[in-house]
Amino acid sequence: MRKVRGTKAKKYAKQFLSLVNLDQVPDIVVKLESVIILMQKEKQFRNMLTSPSFRDEERVGVISYLCEKLGLPEEVKKFLSFLSIEGVLIGLGEIVRYINALYLEAKKKVKGVVTSAVELPDSIKLKIVESLKSITGREVELQYEIDPSLIGGVRVKVGSTMYDLSIKGQLGLLRDKLIKG
């Protein structure tokens, strides 16, 4: 059982994307994430899929059953079986993170999180999406969260870039300037 990191995980993610229709990826990823959660919560299940003490045929049988129950395509079953035989299925979480990133890149999309002190009206949400689209040059998928400690304004995180337009953030900047003198 080997951990999968960085370039290896990205290689497997690219291989996965070459096997499936790009439009199927979001649905498949949701199902794969449920497998990842199950592997994290159920030690016996994780061991069955990843332990070399089980024969390849046994692990592939479990994967086949799982894929059938989840309605995953044959290509995904073969991919998961391949990862299991290679001894890297334990790294499925990292591989799925790269699958998501590569999918968004291929679709010319970015994901972001908008945090505000209160629920934002749809008109403001639309303005945020339009602004981020013009900044990034990509379609934007946003998740909205509420954090009353922001007091007012919004904090937007897209990729590794943070736009903090919250009152809490502005007060923090003001505090830092006052401390520096």
Image (spheres, rainbow, N blue to C red):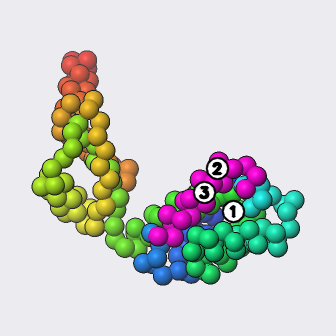
Q: Which residue is mark 1?
A: 89
Q: What residue is drawn where x is 21% and y is 19%?
A: 178
Which residue occupies 57% across, 74% down? 71
Q: CA distance from mark 2 to mark 1?
A: 12 Å
Mark 1 or 3, nearer chain start: 3
Q: Residues within 10 Å of mark 3 (few under 14, many from 20)?
A: many
At label 1, the amino acid type is Leu
What is the residue that sits farthest to the front in this orientation?
A: 69
Magenta span covers which residues? 27-45
For disc 3, the marked residue is 36
Task: Give x and y (percent) for residue 129.
Answer: 21, 59
| The magenta stretch spans residue 39 | yes
Task: Return the x and y of residue 170 as percentages of the image width and height.
Answer: 20, 31
Classified by dominant secondary structure, the portion drawn in magenta counts as helix
Q: Amino acid at mark 2?
A: Gln
Among the 4 quarters of the image, the one containing residue 119? top left
In this view of the protein, can residue 15 be seen by the observer? no
Residue mark closest to the camera, 2 vs 1: 2
Where, quadrant-wise, is the N terminus in this rendering? bottom right
